[in-house]
Amino acid sequence: MFYLSEQFFSIQGEGKYAGTPSYFLRTGGCNLSCPGFGASYEVNGETRYGCDTYFAVDSAYAASWTKVEKSDTLIASLKKEFDVLGYYPHVVITGGEPLMYHSDKVFYAVIEWLVAEGIAVTFETNGTIAIDFEKYPAYRSCIFALSLKLANSGEPEEKRIIPKALQAIAGHAKEAFLKFTIDTRLVETTAQREIEAIRKILPDLPVYCMPVGESRDTIWKNDKAVFAFCMKHNYTYSDRLHIRVFDTTQGV
């Protein structure tokens, strides 16, 4: 059994495959809270701060999540969606933190089906959860967008950087790349030092950097600094197309 906070068809907005038509499965729940990020939202009159997908992270929203208890039910739903499209889109499994469910029987059965059908699967993950690739070989056929959290997340380093988990993914997955969310303040302080420390763990993975922002206005406050940062250090700049186009709208 696992939880989905939403599922929808859209275009990838960030990272290596930005611009690719994709079907998104967003799981509910996360092992990090990232209180340092600037997204604000209200829960029972209380203002909270954290992840820009707070509705898939904060347990206060769990009542709105869908409980998936049978893999066949979700697979049938996906088949119907793909039949309407007339092709198999890339499937992005994001969150929250989707790898919280990686060993769940129902979740893994869905992954096995996607892989068996030859569908490209990308996991958007914070890279803190170790996968046993011998026990769960379907993950070897998946792409991992390692969206590691830096100091601006507000999480302690020992909680957000887990070398064993990262090395397992880099050594066994079909493909992996690093993706960092950076703001102007981090560019001016610790961003380069933090990224290079991570690259010592994962020296062969390409680096994508994108501006912090849960809205167009927030992105505009950070994009030029991140743009210049990428030019200086030979990283790939990643915009956030879905936010540019739809602003704060969910399900895009």
Image: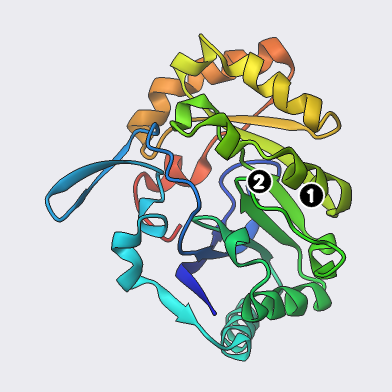
Residue 193 in view here:
yes
Relative to 245, say whether 213 is above or below: above
Tell me how far mark 1 sits from mark 2, CA to CA.
Answer: 8 Å
Q: Which residue is at 39% across, 72% downward?
A: 65
Relative to 185, say whether 10 is above or below: below
Q: Which of the image's four quarters has the N terminus?
A: bottom right
For mark 1, does the 10 Å Cα neighbourhood hold few (<14), some (14 to 19), or many (20 or more) residues? many
Residue 195: where, in percent of width, then height?
67, 23
Which image quadrant is residue 50 in?
Answer: top left
Numbered disc 2: secondary structure: loop
For mark 2, does the 10 Å Cα neighbourhood hold few (<14), some (14 to 19), or many (20 or more) residues? many
Inspect the image, locate mark 2, and give the three-letter code of the amino acid beneath it: Gly
| Label ID, residue 169 | 1
Q: Which residue is at 59% across, 13% downward?
A: 228
Relative to 14, say whether 204 is above or below: above
Residue 33: where, in percent of width, then height?
42, 45
Residue 206: where, in percent of width, then height?
78, 32
Inspect the image, locate mark 1, and give the three-letter code of the amino acid beneath it: Ile
Q: Which residue is at 56% across, 46% downward?
A: 13
Q: Are marks 1 and 2 in contact (CB under 8 Å)?
A: yes
Residue identifier under label 2: 127
Numbered disc 1: secondary structure: helix
Residue 42: where, in percent of width, then height?
20, 49
Q: Nearer the viewer, residue 127 or 178?
A: 127
In the picture provided, is 49 more to the left or to the right than 203?
Answer: left
**Disc 1 or 2, which lies upstream in sequence?**
2
| Label ID, residue 231 | none
Which image quadrant is residue 36 in?
Answer: top left
